[in-house]
Amino acid sequence: MLQDIFTAFWRDWVVLKHRMIKFILSRMVAPILYLVAFGWGLGRSIHTTSGSYLDFLVPGILALNSMNISFNSLAPLHGERIYHKSIEEYFTAPINPLSFAAGKILAAILRGMISSLIIIVLSYAFGANFTITPLFIIILLLNCAIFAEIGYYAAMTIASYEDMGRFNTYILLPMSFLCGTFFSTSKLPAALYYFIHALPLTHTSLLLRSIGRGEPAAIFSLIILLIYTVGCFLLCAHVTTKAQK
Amino acid sequence: MLCLSSLKKVYPYKNAAGKQAEKIAVADLNLKIANNEIFGLLGPNGAGKTTTIRMLTMLTQPTAGTICYDNLNTAANAKKIKALIGVVPQHINFDQDLTVGENMHLHGRLHHMNKQERVSRIDELLAYVELSDRINDSVRSLSGGMKRRLLIVRALMHKPQILFLDEPTVALDPQVRRRIWDLIRKMHHDGVTIVLTTHYIEEAEALCGRVAIMNKGKLIALDSPTNLKEKIGKYVVEWDKDNGERDFKIFPDRETAQKFAAALQQGNILRRHSNLEDVFVELTGRKVN
């Protein structure tokens, strides 16, 4: 099974190697814009209780960027399933279908983490001040895993290319802005507050921000992320088995 | 020996009235295919050929019935059987982001071949289809004929015992089609059992030892092309009707056919040997193409 997971991962790694420079350069654009616009520009007139707005912003950007990259890394799988049908190559091979899912998700996590590393380097270059600990890395990994799994599930179930775009517009885009990325969720109306706190990105933002400040991590948020990781993988396993049949 | 027993596939769908209905793609199919045979599934579009191949290659689950490879049932031995079979789909399903060589390596890795095995097999197979110089090119840059040849040798990477080819020469020009026929004959000569679907009559006649003719999901005839033609009559007379349409009649022997042709008053009379298309039209009243 490990060999088969590696095979599915290897395919995505080969594609990433072909495009590594393009990938890195393109991943720098959005974070630079966020850091300039919200960190340097708008951020200079915003003061938070715990320091500069840039320090507040960076964990949020890390959370939303790792979400977007991990999810969108698996969007091409939709085309491989519907249009090119290249995933049939995996389904006619003597491998456990779950290893296909695991390999694809791991490759998307890798992309999410590379992208996060780029933002961390850029943030330090912009003068941000935050601490990176092993737990900080684990939270990022969990966030990448959750959204890679959601991306996998969407790519394996959604029927048309347009609907993949709609998923981005209706699910990821609102989460990018509302889940504690650019502002604190504490002043939101109660109903919205609880809804936002049911979403994984909020807990990633909160955890990254508190760990980055050197504060203790909220165990509750960590448990929520773990539940999402396991639950989403079970959904991926289900949809893979179903797709093969 | 590949054995299909009471195989059935039903697809649910919503009819024009919006009510749930069922389309029978394959109905009660019973077949036995011997080792080292070239076996053809022949029929028009929608006859159930591709669905049958997809069930045999475990890409589609049968609604009912069983498929056995020697003594292995697909329901319980999917992994073992997948290691024995090679699949050439109708749709060109290469990974578009990989090169020719990488697509071959991916297939080898999925069949647990080590690097040394993969490299030597890729060299051998690409030379076999004269694509060695394209190993580092993107599959997108290949012509239609090259893609088809590559699709076939990719399926041979892990040395399968049975190769399934779904419409292997669809949309190819006659020259490329004949090259692919030669490739299929060579694989058969090397001991591979071949199961192919086609709606090209001449392809079935040129390659297959036995053919199963399917129509509307049902098996309507099963024999060698020669026997099937003999059963309906070996000679055909064709002529133009008064309304401009073409008509034909099948005869058991040359003399009767000649007498009939001589007595005809219509123009553009053609005497020829019968073919599998005649068999199909006789049995179903429909044309294959």
Image (tube, rainbow, N blue to C red):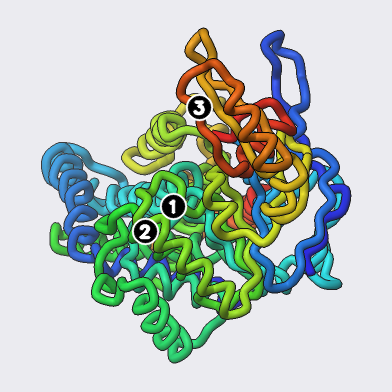
Mark 2, secondary structure of its residue:
helix
Chain label for disc 2? B
In which chain is the residue bearing label 3? B
Relative side of B35 to B71, left or right: left
Badge 3: residue crowd in 10 Å (few <14, some 14–19, many ≥20): some
Pointer 3 with pointer 1, Cβ within 8 A: no
- Does residue A111 appear anywhere in the picture? yes
Which numbered disc flags the more N-terminal residue, 2 or 1?
1
Q: Residue A22 placed where, x, y %?
A: 19, 59
Camera-near label (3 vs 2) is 3
Question: Dot 2 corresponds to which residue?
Answer: B147
Which quadrant, please, contains the N terminus of chain B? bottom right
Q: Give the answer, above or below, for where A29 lies relative to A46.
A: below
Determine the CA span between mark 2 and mark 1.
Answer: 7 Å
- Residue at 61 percent across and 34 percent down: it is B258
- Identify the residue at horizontal 78%, vertical 38% (top origin): B218
Please state if B113 lies on the left or on the right of B95 as rendered.
right
Q: Residue at x 41, y 55 (%)?
A: B177
Secondary structure beneath label 3:
loop
Question: Eyeballing the image, is A161 above or below B16?
Answer: below
Host chain of mark 1: B
- Where is residue A154? Give x, y as percent: 52, 42
Q: Which residue is mark 3?
A: B269
**Between disc 3 and disc 1, whose residue precedes?**
1
* A199 sits left or right of A39 in the view: right
Which amino acid, by three-letter code, is at mark 1? Ile
- Discs 3, 2 touching: Cβ within 8 Å: no
> What label does residue A182 carry, if any?
none
